[in-house]
Amino acid sequence: MKLAGFFLLPAGWLIVISAVVLFPQTASRAIFVFAGVSMEGIGLGLCFRAARVARESSE
Amino acid sequence: MLSTCSLLIVLVPLAAVGLALINTGFGRARGAAHAMLSSLAAMAIAAIVYALVGFSWEGFPGCPAHQFVLGGTSWNWLANEPFLMRGFEWNDSPTTLAMLLQIFTVGIAALIPISTGADRWRMRSTCISTVLLAGWSYPLFAHWVWGGGWLAQLGSDFHLGHGFLDAGGAGTIQALGGLSALAIMWILGPRRGKYPAEGGIAAIPGHNMVYVLFGCALIVPGWIALNSAGAMLFIGAPISHIPLIAATTLLSASASCLAAVAVTHIRFGKPDASLCANGWLGGLVASSAICCFVTPLEAILVGLVAGILVTAAVEVLEVHLAMDDPGGAISVHAVAGIWGLLAVGIFPHIRDGIAPLQLGAFGNSGQFLAQVVGIATLLGFILPMVYGLNWLLNRIDSQRVERRGERQGMDLYELGGGAYPEFVIRGDE
């Protein structure tokens, strides 16, 4: 789970960068930037969840 | 103007001293000397490593840099200055002052994770982790923002406002330090006894709230100096903007502290000293981004939101996500820092002449998006990188102290003596 989270974080960032480079129009650029940030949010959530599961299983 | 800037920079270490006191106060009594010495060692290492290596990778706008071309645009990603300060001229130029300022600010960034790792982070690991932060993570992101890197050029290259703006280091110093603290917390895990096996959460209060609150007061002049010097050196603010910067900094901190007082009073029936201190700090952190871009009234609004966010984030992290962050550094520095960066895009007064930006010709259109791209870079690139570096370090040499050391206390275990020897009750007394 942690690995998936740490995969999604840079993946979301690459979507953000790609949106800035590929879409000159404000609307489509903004949509893809926020899609990338949302993916980062999911990645961050997975990392937090993984840390909690690891702590609970070590008890 | 530059002599004023020099004087301001000399005040910046007060911010570091305040943070060190706050870190110490939030920890246990049996780790107080360890926390203070770790802070001093981290500041010393950060200054040396940054001066010898870090600044070469950060550089300054217009310096030789490593670049690559993608999508028809040249991406400036790393400076190419000589190492060990070879050929560096010590004079009163903005480049020299920027380096001097950052010798102090990289130390501030290094202090932030020490708060999160309180009572369980070895001093040796703290020092090595600081080398990584001051020698690589901080200079890399600072180059992108302040050294003429690709984030600073989002305005000229992609018509996103004035590019990513961060006058006083809400992203470069605070959010980077806060995200490093998050990585350290994931690696170290909680203090023993914080989350008992039988369920619930044990309260481990800070050992000296007076240190914490005195640190909050001491930090203010340092923070005003940091924001003013940063705005002058990195944004080009004229000296006439210092009163505005001082006012927005103090108003944001005040509003944030009062918001924390109100929230904790509503939640717990009484104001909570540690959360109110966190609120005060959160307001200062948010002010670093907005200090020269908003009106005083807007600074109060930003501070109010920062205070609510910080108190909520502390509870969410500790209770719902089971993350043990003794000083609330992640909530204060990462959450409030990111909020401040967003606020720059929400309150774009750059066009109104309140801020003195003479960059780019694209107005404020896209400024919010430029700030979001910067925040996405912090979360999507810097956080995994910092975690990866510290994870590797942990594989080579465990960063967490042994069980015996944690039980005995960091002072006795790592330093051989406590911070308060007179407080020890001996058998013959």
Image (cartoon, coloured by chain):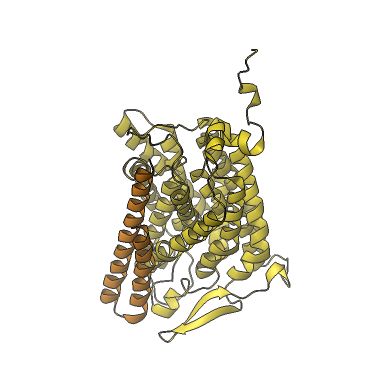
Chain colours: A orange, B yellow
- Number of marks: 0
Q: Nearer the viewer, residue B297 or B316?
A: B316
Q: Quadrant of residue B89?
A: bottom right
Residue B102 point in image, percent of width and height: 60, 59
Residue B103 point in image, percent of width and height: 63, 58
Instruction: Tell me: residue B74, above or below residue B128.
Output: below
Identity of the residue drawn at 50% across and 31% down: B209
Q: Nearer the viewer, residue B227 or B139?
A: B139
Instruction: Tell me: residue B161, above or below residue B128.
Output: below
Horizontal side of B145 relative to A38 (left or right) equals: right
Identity of the residue drawn at 70% across and 65% down: B92
Q: Nearer the viewer, residue B79 or B219?
A: B79
| Residue B1 in view | no
Quadrant in which the C terminus of chain B appears: top right
Quadrant in which the N terminus of chain B appears: bottom right
Q: Quadrant of residue B383?
A: bottom left
Instruction: Tell me: residue B9, above or below residue B429.
Output: below
Residue B68 point in image, percent of width and height: 50, 82
